[in-house]
Amino acid sequence: MALDRSDVEKIAHLARLGLTEADLPRTTDALNSILGLVDQMQAVDTSGIEPLAHPLEASQRLRADQVTESNHREAYQAIAPAVENGLYLVPKVID
Amino acid sequence: MHQMTLAEIARGLADKKFSSEELTRSLLARIAQLDPQLNSFITVTPELAIAQAQAADARRATGETGALLGAPLAHKDLFCTQGVRTSCASRMLDNFTAPYDATVVSRLAQAGAVSLGKTNMDEFAMGSGNESSFYGAVKNPWNLAHVPGGSSGGSAAAVAARLLPVATGTDTGGSIRQPAAFTNLTGLKPTYGRVSRWGMIAYASSLDQAGTFARTAEDCALLLQGMAGFDPQDSTSIDEPVPDYSASLNGSLQGLRIGLPKEYFGAGLDPRIGDLIQQAVKELEKLGATVKEISLPNMQHAIPAYYVIAPAEASSNLSRFDGVRFGYRCENPADLTDLYKRSRGEGFGIEVQRRIMVGAYALSAGYYDAYYLQAQKIRRLIKNDFMAAFHDVDVILGPTTPNPAWKIGAKNADPVAEYLEDVYTITANLAGLPGLSMPAGFVDGLPVGVQLLAPYFQEGRLLNVAHQYQQATDWHTRSPEGF
C-alpha cells in the first residue's frame, strides 16, 4: 500500500516534524521506497516464532531502591534554550 | 611518529623514547595540516589533549604503566564528552555541550588515553557513507572522491590517514565494520552488551554497540580492553568477565573451523571482492584452519527487518529532541506544537526525518503486528540460523561489503540503494554477535574487507584469527598515498 501526501502529513504530525511544502513530494517518494523494501518481510512465514527483543534475551536488571544520583539541575539548565527560576520555558499552553 | 601503531606507541612511551606530550603535539599538527582534505573531525580539542598528555606523562613519571597511558585517540561525536560539544553531526546538537562523560570516554580517560577530539559521522549514526553529516561529507583517504563508509566515517578516515593510531566508533548495522573495510582498517563490533552504551547518544538501542578502529588486530585488543566491561549505568550491559584480549592474539589457528555462508557469495557481490575473500580463506587454511560451506537462509530478510526495528527505536529515542531542555530551538515559536515541529523539522536532516517517520508509521495503531512484531520474529529466525551454524564452525567468514567504497553523491537519489550495501553486516547486529572486518586487498585502488563473526563474547577469537592473518599478510600495513 503506497502512502500518499496526506498519509505523510499525518505521520509527520505524529512525529512532530514540521515538513515544508518542498519536502513533501521527495519525502513521500523516499518513504514509499523504504516501505517497499520493508514489505518484503510480509512474505516470510513466522508462524510459531516468538519475537526477539534483546539479542541475548536478558531481562531488565533491578537495583536496590537507593538514591544514587546527585542533583545536576544547574548543569542541565545551563544547556537549555530558555529557563527561568529553575524552570524550562515553553510558549504559553493555557490561556 | 604518525606511522606507529598503538602497540608501538605503548612501547615507545614505556621506553621513554618520547613523551605523550611530544606525540600529542605532533599528531595535532598533522591533523591541522591534513584534515581539511578529509573533514574527519567535527571538533579538535588541542588544549584538552595537551593537558591530558601532560597528566599522563606525570602519571608515568610516578611509575604508573599501562598500554593506554598517554596513548592518543579520538571519539566518534556521539559519545558524550563533558565540557566538549557532542553534536552527533546534527544541527539539532550543534550547540550541545555534554554535561557528563560517556562510560567509554571516562574509562579510557582513567586509563590515561589522550582524546584529540570528536570525529565526524552520519547524522545520528544514520547512514553508510558519512554523507548525511551537518558538517559535510567525510572523504576517503584512499581516494578523496569516494566515501569512507559510515556511519563512523570520521573515525575510519582519521585512523586510515594516520592522524591517529586508534579511534572509537559505534555499530548499529555495520557502522564500524563497513568503514573499516572501506579504509583498510581493522574494526571490531563487540557482542551486544559487552561495552557500555551509557552516554552514547542512542539510535537503535537494541542494536547499538560501541567498538574499535585500528590498523591492526593487536591495537583493537588494546583499545577494547580499556572499553569493555559491565556498567550498572547501562541497563542492557552484560555482567560477564572480560578476558585478556592481548593474551588471546597468539593462539594457533590449527584446527580452526571456518564457515563460509553460501548466501554471502551469491548475486550482488563484486566478483573481484569474492576473489580476494577466497585468497584470505586460502591464507587461513595455510595457517591450519579448515573450511566448510554453511547456510544462513534468512540473511535476505535482514535488511527489511532492520529498516523496521532501527527506525522504530529511533523514532522513540529521538523524541527527546524537542527544543525544550537542550539542543536546537526554532525562532519565535507560535505555540508548543509549533515549537516541537519547527525545532525538529529544522534541527534534523532529511535522512533522520525519514527514519523517524518510518518508525512512527511502523509503530502506529494497526501496523504494529505487521511491522515491528514481524521484524522481531524475523530477528529470531536470523539468530537461530547463527546458533545452528556455530554448532559446526568456530567463526563465520565472508566479505564485509558487496562493493568497494562508492563515489560521494552516487547513492543520494534513493535511500534504499545505500541501505542495500549493508547486506552482510546487519545480521550480526540483529543477532547481537561480535564481528570484525580486516583488510584483504584492493579493487581499483580501494580497500576490501573480510568479515569474521563469532559466537557471543568470543571477541578474543576474532582478534586471534585477525592477528594471525596479519602476521602472514601485509594488506593492513599499506598507507594511502599522501598520508
Image: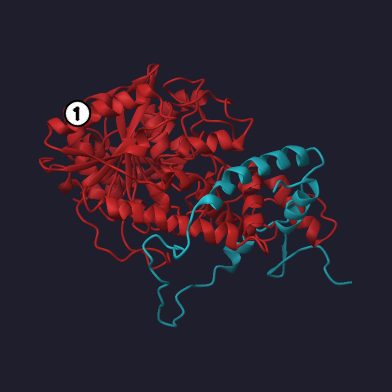
Chain colours: A cyan, B red
Residue B382 or residue B73, whichever sits in front: B382
Q: Where's the C terminus of chain B, which quadrant?
A: top left
Residue B212 or residue B357, whichever sits in front: B357
Residue B275 or residue B342, whichever sits in front: B275
Point 41% across, 36% down: residue: B178
Is B423 on the left or on the right of B70, as rendered? right
Q: Residues within 10 Å of mark 1 (few under 14, many from 20)?
A: some
Q: How many marks?
A: 1
- The part of the image, by quadrant, that contains residue B5 is top left
x and y percentages locating residue B130 in the rendered image = 53, 35
Residue A6 or residue B55, whichever sits in front: A6
x and y percentages locating residue B266 in the rendered image = 38, 32
Asked whether residue B67 appears in the rendered view, the answer is no
Is A23 on the left or on the right of B263, as rendered? right
- The part of the image, by quadrant, that contains residue B2 is top left
The residue indicated by pointer 1 is B282
Point 38% across, 39% down: residue: B177
